[in-house]
Amino acid sequence: FWKEIEGEGWRGGVEYGLMSTTTDRDIAIQYSGTKVKRGTVFEISVGRVDVGASISFLSQYAGEEEYLLPPFACLEVEGKPRLEQTSEGQVILFPLRLNVNHKIITVEMLLQRRKQLHMSMLKNLREELQLYLEAELEDFDSGARRVSSSWGKLCASRAKSDFDGLCKDHETLDADVLNDDSMYKDLITEAIEYKKWALMKFNHFTGNEPDHQPEEFDQQSEPPSGSFHHRILVLPLVDLGRAGVLSELVTGVMGFPWAAMEQGEAQADLSGWTPETQALTAAQELKVMEALAGNANLRSVKFKGDHSIVLPKGCGSEELDLGMQQAEGYVLALSLLVGACSSLRSLNLRLGYADWAVVVRGLRHCTGLTRLNDWGGFGEFVGKGQESVDLSSTWREIKDKELVQALLLYAGQTCRQLSISNSTIGADGCTVLAPALGCLTTLAELDLSNNGVGDEGAVALSGALGGLSGLQRLDLSNNGLGAEGCQTLSATLGRLTALAQLDLSNNDVGDAGAVALSGALGGLSGLQRL
């Protein structure tokens, strides 16, 4: 204290605690220790700012003229000490200069410090949210937003209002709450999450097409009650952080266990889900399949009636044996599960004809499937490796002709021989069949004989046949084709450059039809049998 601090050029120190002083010299000498040995007195020079607080009015010794100085006062030794002889004895006086630390805070202020920092952080997050929304609204019409700017402003206002509600809640908290490390961490996380959820609300609200007519959109100041935009507008921000809530809102698929899938639960309980009543779109079905496939922990699925399916390797399973499952009441859910298992190579199940039209919607996503065994209506009917398919009897037995279309679309990548003969498919059947025929890109032989296609059916088939560039054999015999039908087919037949055999026997071709066919077939150099 008395020696100069090396490298700093001054003597003295800092008093960490409260320091009691007096303006009465005699009182100071009295307490200096002269009764025991030579006393020591600090002779402190202060300015008006550093004088400290007089507490004589609080002291039982009011005459001592006591002044109290705050902690962290700096005492700097000035000049040399001097020895004085007093009536009490010898005293050494050290001349000091004092500087009070005016930035020292009180205990109350210290306890409030975390709360002040926290509220400053909330204010900063609020300003960041405000700046983002203002920038988006300024460039709203030129961006990829799907709603009007007035709706965008409405959602931005609601998002800010929701965040302001959080700020008010945090403002009312006692400082002691924020001085708890665990609680402080949770509150910081909550604030950051709220800002994220506010942005999510705005972006999802403005990035989705309105689910109502444009004229209604222009006339209403806010989204209609019950619409997607209204539901997300009134949704509390905290709900956006709950598993499954946003997925249900965005997809519009209600009742599906979104939360369980997002949280990676081992079982998907679909027993209470009724997708058949929701008229799901292809996009919605795809979202459900993605949710199932995205859960790496999924090992079983529960359907209505306590029917369950075990998935040893989750949706990555290559084999799935559903045995005697009848799928009553949950065929669509079953179809979506099959679609989620896109790695399937072998599938064994039992279905009726009507159910097949639904399940095929999922099968289309199983691009590696080579064995499909149905113990219901089809037996071992069709798989991705099936080259020859005969649907002649099947067409006659199935009432839902679109099912045949679905099955052909499924098998189309490998099918080389297709026969639907003696089935009286007629013009309506050709209309159903045509879209599927166009996808059979590997087809080499097609037998549609004895089906009563007629001229109207020929019109439906002509477009599809034109895309079968590898077709080598085509049998359209005994189909009631007239001149008009032959004229329609002639333009298509001329493009089948690989055609080697064409059977048009037992049709009423007529002179006009023959002329049209001769012009088209003349360019088929590989045609061997007509």
Image: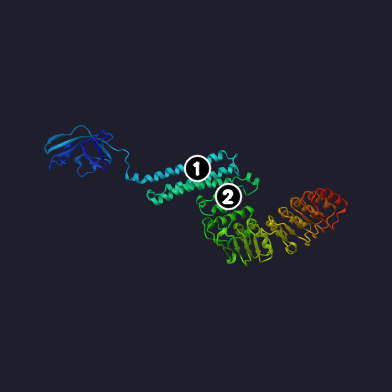
Q: What residue type is labelled 1?
A: Leu
Q: Nearer the viewer, residue 478 or 161?
A: 478
Query: Of marks 1 and 2, which one's residue comes earlier in the chain?
Result: 1
> Where in the figure is residue 353, as x and y percent of width and height?
69, 63
Amino acid at the residue labelled 2: His
Residue sitting farthest toward the top: 79
State which quadrant residue 482 falls in: bottom right
Q: Which labelled disc corresponds to residue 129?
A: 1
Check residue 230 in the rendering and tell me which mark sits there, or answer none: 2
The label nearer to you, 1 versus 2, is: 1
**Residue 301 lies in quadrant:** bottom right
Label 2: state its secondary structure. Answer: helix
437 to the left or right of 1: right
For residue 455, which numbered disc appears in the image? none
Per the model, the C-alpha gap separating discs 1 and 2 is 21 Å
Residue sitting farthest toward the bottom: 324
Q: Is residue 135 left or right of residue 509?
A: left
Q: Nearer the viewer, residue 489 or 210?
A: 489
**In the image: residue 268, left or right of residue 421:** left
Vertical comparison of 418 with 34: above or below: below
Q: Where is residue 302 in the image (x, y as percent from the top left)?
A: 57, 63
Is the residue marked by circle 2 packed among few (<14), some (14-19), or many (20+) residues within 10 Å? some
Displayed quadrant of residue 270:
bottom right
Q: Nearer the viewer, residue 343 or 104?
A: 343
Q: Where is residue 479 in the image (x, y as percent from the top left)?
A: 82, 58
